[in-house]
Amino acid sequence: MALRNLDLQAQTLYAELLERVLTDTIPPFASRASRAFVSKEVKGRRYWYVQYRDVKAMRQVYLGPETDQLLSIIESIRKSALDHSEGLEKRRQLCSALVAMGAASWPPAIMRVCERLAAQGMFSSGAILVGTLAYGLSGVVLGFRFRAANAMTNDLDFSFNPALELALPDAPETDVPSAIDSLRMGFVPALSLKSDNASTSFRVRGSDLRVDFLTTLRRSGKPVFMKRFNTAALPLPYMDYLIQAPLKAVIPFDAGILANIPNPAHFAVHKLILSTLRPTREEAKARKDIEQASDVFEALIETRPDDANGAVKDAWGRGPKWRKALQTGFRRMNKQRRETAEKLAQGAPIFGKIATH
């Protein structure tokens, strides 16, 4: 079944919503005259901030690592003539319209958790939303209505990049356990079997609702305590690749939740590789990985083929282990979603090479 595009009006409304929500992250007292967009380079990467002066001192609000998308948003905000005095009600109208037009949406329970953590500074401190919610939002970002069955989830997955500790030395701390507990939804820590009682997950007894915290793989493989968030995160392989170039996205819930998600091309490659790591008992999850990777790749081939090629070339160039995983994942896709595999081999030359190896 072919993917369905979000119509042009929906894509235009989403662009307006993203600009409004991002602009609203700038403190209201930081007037146009007193604010400036500034950047700093940390270990070869450039990060952007809004800088402003309040009554006490010069302050900065983190926007994210430099990407073409973020630079475009910054330029749009600089030139914007939108009246943001309409505030939250206008944003709620935009969110409702987007969902009605087919943008991805999720049950209120999981959105309450995401909204609370966002309000406590998770995303402004650099956390990245990964997993199925990132899949659904990738569809909105790319202008597509992804299959609802592939977007269904009761999991919230967040990833942290330890390198941001250097880029965000003054970022506020987010007490994740307290924020989750304040919802009074019955969440309890799920103790890890790999460490001394370091919990990297919270779940609701008698429910599938779960929140997981992840990070890049360390040598020991043990959970890493993230002081800024007062929680531990589980290191996973290939995570550094997934989160290396995140984008800004808005979850169309209530007045919109500003989140960080992986670059869609990296998300698709990561899902392709992840499908090869699942044990036999998780075959259903492996099939869902392929479905999600296929949907995102199809959208990329239609809208951003260079992104797909670039992401795969990056992964292919990381060594034999990566190449083997890509080959195995592509073979799985060819069996499960043959039409998608053929489109990729035609539209993304690097996949044509992988198919012949």
Image (cartoon, grey):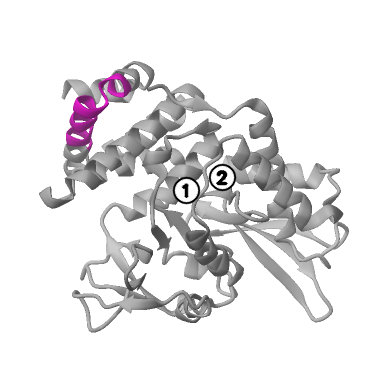
- Judged from this view, the residue extending furthest toward the left is 280
User: Do residues under tags 1 and 2 come within 8 Å of each other at their CB atoms?
Assistant: yes
Q: Residue at x 43, y 44 (%)?
A: 135
Mark 2 element type: loop
Q: Eyeballing the image, is 135 above or below 217?
A: above
Q: Residue at x 19, y 40 (%)?
A: 325
Q: Specify whether 99 is left or right of 310.
A: right
Res 122 seen here: no
- Screen quadrant of the C terminus: top left
Q: Tell me the number on the disc at residue 89.
A: none
Mark closer to the chain start, 1 or 2: 2
Q: Amino acid at mark 2?
A: Thr
Q: Position of residue 69 (x, y in %)?
A: 60, 41
Say which element carries label 1. Answer: loop
* Quarter of the image where one finds residue 2: top left
Residue 232 position in % (x across, y down)? 35, 75
Whole-number angstrom distance, CA of label 1 to CA of label 2 = 7 Å
Image height of 276 relative to 296, above or below: below
Residue 67 badge = 2
Q: Position of residue 105 (x, y in %)?
A: 52, 47
Residue type for callout 1:
Ala
Residue stretch in magenta:
326-341
Q: Is residue 52 in view from this perspective?
A: yes
Would you call the spot at circle 1 few (<14 residues within 10 Å), some (14-19), or many (20 or more)?
Answer: some
Q: Is residue 349 above or below residue 72?
A: above
Q: Where 323 sits versus 331, above or below?
A: below
Q: Residue at x 44, y 64 (%)?
A: 163
Residue 245's disc number: 1
